[in-house]
Amino acid sequence: MVCWKSFRPLLMVIVGGCFWSLGLAGCHGRLLGESEDPVMESEDLGQPKKVFNCDATEEFLTTITYLRHKKVLGLADQDMRAVATEVSGGCHGAAGRFIMVTELLLKAGVDGRSALLVGEEYAHEDGARTEAFRDLFRHSFVPSGLDLAPPASIALAQRLLKSVRQPPEALADEFEELVGFCVRHKGLDLSRPQCAELVTSILVSAPPLVDCDLPGTSESFIEAYTFLTNNEGPHLTTRDALTMAQRLAAISPYATFNFIEAYGFAVAPKGMGLDRSQGVRFAMELAEKTVGQMTGVTPGPRS
C-alpha cells in the first residue's frame, strides 16, 4: 500500500507550484482554470456553453511536455499527441487538471492506461470537481481512511461526484468527516467496508446544501448519533441510532436540532412527561416538519 504522504510533495511541485522542473511557467490557479474568465455564449442558462477563447495550444503544449518527461508511461509520439489533443479540448486549466489526476493515480499504483483515461476525463471538468475527486480518492485510498484498492477508490469518488446533491467543495469535506468518525475507535469503529457503504448512503441521501449557515450533513449525522446513543437522549442501540441518524440527515441538516429540542420537551416532567419511546416518536414527527412550504424564511440561529 502506497502512503499518500509519500507522493503528496511531488503533487505540490507539479500542481501546487510552477512547472519549473519541466521548463514551463504555469502555476496552480492558472492550471486549474481559475485565473481567467472564459468568454461563453449567453443563451441556454444552466446548459453547457461554447467557449470562444480556449487556450487549446497552451494546454496541448503543457500536456505533451509533461508526457515526454513521463518515461514510465512508455507512450509513442503518436499516442502523446493524441492524449495532448484530447486534453486541450478541456479549455482553461485542462492540462493542470489532467496532470494532477494522472500523477495522483500513478503514485497510488494505478496502471498508466487507466490513469491517463481518468486524467483525460477530469481535463474536461472544472477545477472544483477535479480537486474534489482528488480529495475523495485520497480519503478512500489511504490506510487511515477507507483503505480501499485504487480501482475501488476511483469508482467511489466518481460515484459520489455523480450522485451527491452538494457542491463538490463541500462534498469532500463532508466525506472526510464522516469517514473519520466511522473508522475511529472513539467513533463508530466499524469495518472499512461497512464505513464505505454507510458514508455513501448518508451522502447520497442528503439534501442539497442551500444555506451555508446551516450545519453540514456530517455534523448533523454525528450530532444525531451521539445524542441518540447517550443517556441524555433515548439511549438507542447502535443499529437503531444509525438508522435514525441517517433518517434525520436525509431530511435536512437542521432536522437534528429540531429532534433534540423536541425530545427534550417531550420527556421532561414539566413538558409532556412521555417515556423515551414516545418521546422519540414525537421528536421525529416534528423533525420531519423541518422542511416547510414557506418561501423566503430562514431558520433562526442555533443556541
Image (cartoon, rainbow, N blue to C red):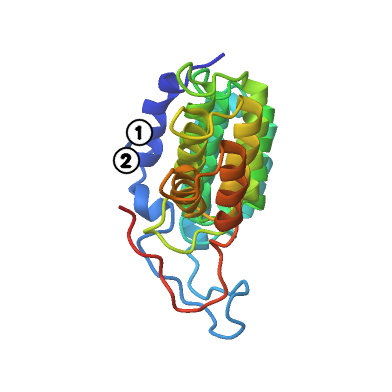
In the rendered image, the vertical position of residue 144 relative to residue 26, given as above or below: above
Question: Which percent across, then down, holds residue 272?
Answer: 50, 50
Q: For mark 2, does the 10 Å Cα neighbourhood hold few (<14), some (14 to 19), or many (20 or more) residues? A: some
| Amino acid type of the residue that numbered disc 2 sits on in the rendered structure | Gly
**Near-viewer residue (294 or 162):** 294
Count all numbered tags in the image, as a single digit. Answer: 2
For numbered disc 1, what is the local secondary structure? Answer: helix
In the rendered image, the vertical position of residue 177 relative to residue 96, given as above or below: above
Question: Which percent across, then down, holds residue 89?
Answer: 60, 60
Q: Residue at x 48, y 16 (%)?
A: 185
Q: Quadrant of residue 35?
A: bottom left
Q: Are marks 1 and 2 in contact (CB under 8 Å)?
A: yes
**Near-viewer residue (152 or 174):** 174
From the image, which quarter does the N terminus lie in? top right
- Give the label on residue 17, or none: 2
Image-based side of 162 in relation to 55, left or right: right
For numbered disc 2, what is the local secondary structure? Answer: loop
Q: Which residue carries the number 1 mark?
A: 13
